[in-house]
Image (tube, coloured by chain):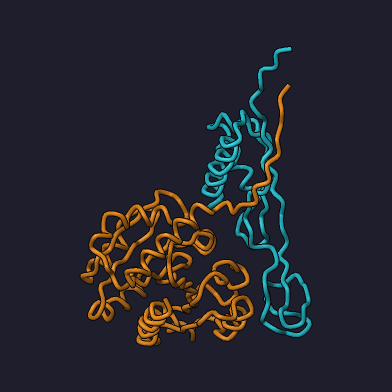
Chain colours: A cyan, B orange
Amino acid sequence: MHELSIVQALCDQVKEVAISHGAQKVVRIVIEVGELSNVVPELLQTAFAVFREAEPLLENAEIESRRIPLKLLCQACGHEFHPALRRFRCPQCLSLQVKVLQGEELLLRDVELELVEEAHHV
Amino acid sequence: MCETSHVRVMENILHGNDHLAKELQEEWTRTRTFVVNLLSSPGAGKTTLLEATLPALKERYRVLVLEGDIETERDAERIRALGIEAIQITTGGTCHLDAHMVQQVWQPVRSNSPYDFIFIENIGNLVCPASYALGEHLRVVLLSVPEGDDKVPKYPKAFRSSQVLSITKADLLPYFDFQVERVQREAFELQPKLVTLVLSVTTGQGITEWTRFLEKQREETFRLN
């Protein structure tokens, strides 16, 4: 259950973005959660609900987690595959020289901000 | 009317931890302090392995142990009983160590450095500690025989992010249906560079090799740098 720590880091990161853009509120946060990132998106939601209450900038913010499936590239034969049973071995040529294309990430992708209202005098 | 704005960030959420871990590693590399992060589930034998390893190392090297636990000083006391410096990090509930916690306890003792080895014993947990770099040069995951030989694909990140797999309590192999070959094969398919060692503190199996391995890793790491 390290999702609390992750959400804490995420909230700090989002706050930094919000402040640097002079935002009043954060509306939406989109994160990418790799299949092999060891993070449970549902637990992130629960943890986020706790942090949101303590932070006025985030009080209305929604969080969207996009699950990124694991995808590997065989560097021997060029085959792209999703590894069954966590076997990082190419099913076509049996090579172990594989590269992770995606699925290990834990990224803050987008932040949607509500900017400070500018005074328009007509 | 409120104006909204989309900002594309694409930044690792744990970048703060990773950045701090990198700084710690750079400092330790400069002082030739070889740092080992030990990961396992509770009771796999991390402290016991250290107790068996450190007396031989302390004859030739300056060693420091950072003991991570949720509560109590018990593990640090076990290490201190061997005449080795140990600092307890109690997280008060957090299920893993992070680079910040390590830095906090490192600051007051860094003036005593250079240490030749620092062993960081993580919180007993095969999931969460795997996500947090602590500045270590070597990550070692322990799997004890009573835990079962089916664990590698169940906790892929712990095994994939480690450089060494220590199968501990090998003296219990005759009493458990635990196939070392199965673990090795599954670990190899997840992380081909993973080095597997089979150890028993009770019989002494593999302990000398493990200690030599650590010495060699230290030499190789700092010769390269």
The residue sitting at the top extreme is: A122
How many numbered dots are placed on residues in this image?
0
Instruction: Indicate whether B182 appears above or below B150.
Output: below
**Which residue does the image show at 51% across and 48% down from the upper left?**
A5
Residue A46 lies, in percent from the top left, at 61, 42
Residue B13 shown left or right of residue A109 in the figure: left
Residue B91 lies, in percent from the top left, at 40, 51
Quarter where residue B199 is shown: bottom left
Residue B124 lies, in percent from the top left, at 45, 62
Q: Nearer the viewer, residue A58 or B167?
A: A58
Do we see residue B209 in this rendering?
yes
Residue B108 lies, in percent from the top left, at 27, 54
Residue A101 shown left or right of residue B175 in the figure: right
Q: Nearer the viewer, residue B214 or B92?
A: B214
**Which residue does the image show at 58% across and 31% down from the upper left?**
A57
Q: Nearer the viewer, residue A83 or B151?
A: A83
Instruction: Indicate whether B24 appears above or below A5.
Output: below
Quarter where residue B63 is shown: bottom left
The residue sitting at the front extreme is: A122
Image quadrant holding the N terminus of chain B, namely top right
Q: Nearer the viewer, residue B165 or A12?
A: A12
Image quadrant holding the C terminus of chain B, namely bottom left
Do we see residue B203 in this rendering?
no
